[in-house]
Amino acid sequence: MTTQALLEDFTEPQIERSRRRKRATLPLRLASAGLGFAAMCVLGFTRLGAQLVHGAGSLAGGGWLASAALGAVALDLVLTLLGLPISARMETVNRAWGLSNRSWRLFWTDAAKGFLIGALLLDAVSIGLFALIRALPGTWWIPACAAAAGLVFVLSFLVPVVFEPLFNRFRPMEEGPLRERLMQVAAQTGVSVRDILVSDASRRTNSMNAYVSGMGKTRRIVVWDTTVKQATPEQVAAITAHELGHAARRDVITGTAVSALGMIAGTLLLAAAVHWRALLDAAGTPAVADPRTLPLIMAVGTVLGALSAPLFNAYSRRVEARADQYALDLTRDPAAVVATWRNLAVQSISDLDPHPLAQLWLGTHPAIPARIAHARGWGARHGVAVVLPRPGESPDPGQQTSQIAEP
């Protein structure tokens, strides 16, 4: 998008700041993704991964159970350690841009928690998978498909009630105009909401966000405390309407089902791949049932994930655009929606002009200018004028020059 087009909603300093931040962070994002991909391929498609699993398992006797369990931990540890330097560098960059409030103690605590959660999940999958392969050598892939799909649904329920509280503290939103406005929005959608919570996101970031978490009786609206501080009530309502749109359109359940189908398809492709003798020989594993196959399985899954990313991201962007439409239809306030995206882009120093390839492989949401254009288009179609001050001419949070310091 040209600078001239962006100037309708952002000042030149805001546009330049966005471009500078992209130049500082995009190489790190690509390096992180590339390193993770390359490391997993090296471990999986050479004998290094099999040797690592064998060595880890030998610490507890070398049986299949020990190799499956300790090998999973060893693999997760290696991948975590390889990624930490880039993560630490990204943390430093985010601090320089004033976007991160994390202490280094909290950074390392978060990294340790992430490692432990990942290791436990990979451990469970590894043990369960090789138990199935050993028990049902010819048909293991059938229950494996069912288990993979079931795991997706289980995690969808567990994340809001088990994993989220490990990283953030939540408190009920105080009674007042904002809570009343959000409950009014929820009532308009007909979506049952258990509670409205405020997350202590400011311990980690100055960015804004709000989301609807959980399903059924666990569903709640979660608003970051940074959003409460930086956005107007109508902007918070617009974000909440978007998130409730996902629930009203059953996007969470549908997305979970799509992910489950993806896991089934991936498991079938994986089963075909690991029975290819050339791959087993390259990976240094004698048979599919040997836990030394785990790195190969993870490598094949990584390749399949990378190849399918554009498809899943395109689906995600479509769902997000539909939720934007829902929020506009519900609030009928395109000016508030435009102000919301302006504010979010400025406070988070969002990429205002993402490269098409980066958007293809990394973009789960439409770019902010596209979302603003969508809101303006809705207003034009419905005869609702979008009247907002020019950028830099109003005390509105979305129009102020960001208080975030530049490095």
Image (cartoon, rainbow, N blue to C red):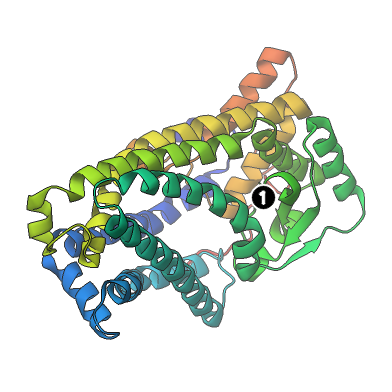
Picture quadrant of residue 103: bottom right
Residue 66 in the image, given as x and y percentages of width and height: 31, 77
In the image shown, does 331 or 183 lie closer to the viewer? Answer: 183
Residue 36 in the image, given as x and y percentages of width and height: 29, 60
Q: Badge 1: few (under 14), some or many (20 or more) residues near its Cα, within 10 Å?
A: many
Asked if one can make out residue 7 in the rendered structure from this viewpoint, the answer is no
Amino acid bearing label 1: Ser
In the image shown, does 406 or 25 lie closer to the viewer? Answer: 25
What residue is shown at x 37% (from left), y 65% (from top)? 127
Residue 26 in the image, given as x and y percentages of width and height: 37, 54
Q: Secondary structure at mark 1?
A: strand
Residue 61 in the image, given as x and y percentages of width and height: 26, 84
Residue at the farthest front position: 135
Q: Is residue 185 above or below residue 267?
A: above
- Reading the image, the residue beneath label 1 is 213
What residue is shown at x 92% (from left), y 55% (from top)? 175
Residue at the farthest right position: 176
Point out the image quarter for the N terminus: top left
Left or right? Give the position of 396 relative to 121.
right
Left or right? Give the position of 401 relative to 290.
right
Asked if one can make out residue 321 in the rendered structure from this viewpoint, the answer is yes
